[in-house]
Image: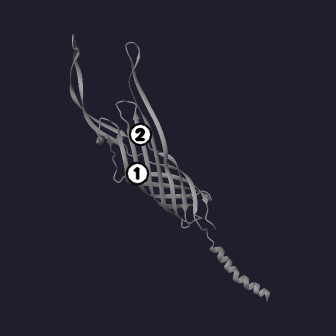
Amino acid sequence: MKGLLLLGSLWVLLPISSFSQRSKKPKGPTISVSTSINYYPALEPYSSFNNYFVEDDDLILTYLTANSGTFVVEEGDLFYIERTSTNSIPTQLLSLGASVQVKMESLLFHELSLTKLSVTKTSNEINYATLDSLGKTRLLFRQGFEHKASAFGLRYELGKYFGKRKSAKVRFGLSAGLEPSLYFYKRTSNSFQEYPVSIKLFTVELSLNPMLSFMLSKKVSLDVKVVPNLLLGDFGGATEDNPNFSNKQKKLSREYRSPDIDVAFSAVLRYNIKEPKK
């Protein structure tokens, strides 16, 4: 009798046990951190245009008087001059980045990435000199610039991977991204004929990003992304600090394509720091 009861109990409990084992699925998000290599194309340059007249004087006669000193007689013509200045913002074509990604059970993910981070300073100088009749060096003039530039950008993405969670070695993914960026630039000339140029720029870009994700191991994966950025807003601008210009003339302009789209690329190496609970 006891044997029959034991067999009956096993017959009831085994299906329940096997069902509970089959129903156990990983629960919770997968959290990963990553480092990336990002490519961004150069920004459109700023330019300014102004015009003015210059009198070209030619010496005709110099003579002395006993009471009044030296007299100089000159004549000349007015020349019309157009001046165009173009300033390109230094851009990180290749840069390192980092991100944190939270991937849900449905393979839907949220990701926050540091896409731009740089501070640069460069300078160049050319001195022009000649020798006078006594053999002494006389500096005629010097040219050159000092450049200071910095950039900072973040991108938030909401997307999804397609394919089996565990068995797929290669998965396709698609995400929508929003990327605000800050740019600062200053060019200071060594020549008294050139004036400092300053650029402060805040941009907001929207992107739809296709990607391929390669599972390199249980915890490591590699994502390759194409990031076509659509410029939603561009705030700030550039000025040339020339005291001879009006406030309107000091402002530099920039031409845009319509629509203004550029394509960036990212290679992201991920490492899972938190796995779903089983």
Viewer-proximal residue among 25 and 123: 123
Q: Position of residue 241 (x, y in %)?
A: 35, 37
Q: Which residue is mark 1?
A: 203
Image quarter for residue 105?
bottom right
Amino acid carrying mark 1 in the image = Thr
- Corner quadrant of residue 22: bottom right
**Mark 2 → mark 1, Cα distance in angstroms:** 18 Å
Location of residue 50 in the rendering, given as x and y in whole percent from the top left corner: 28, 38
Q: Is residue 18 visible?
A: yes
Residue lying at 38% horizontally and 15% vertically, measured from the top left: 132
Residue position marked by numbered label 2 in the rendering: 186
Residue lying at 33% horizontally and 38% vertically, measured from the top left: 85
Question: Dot 1 surroundings within 10 Å: few (below 14), some, or many (20 or more)?
Answer: some
270 over 239 or under it: above or below: below
Q: Secondary structure at mark 2?
A: strand
Q: Please give left or right for residue 102 compared with residue 54 in the image.
A: right
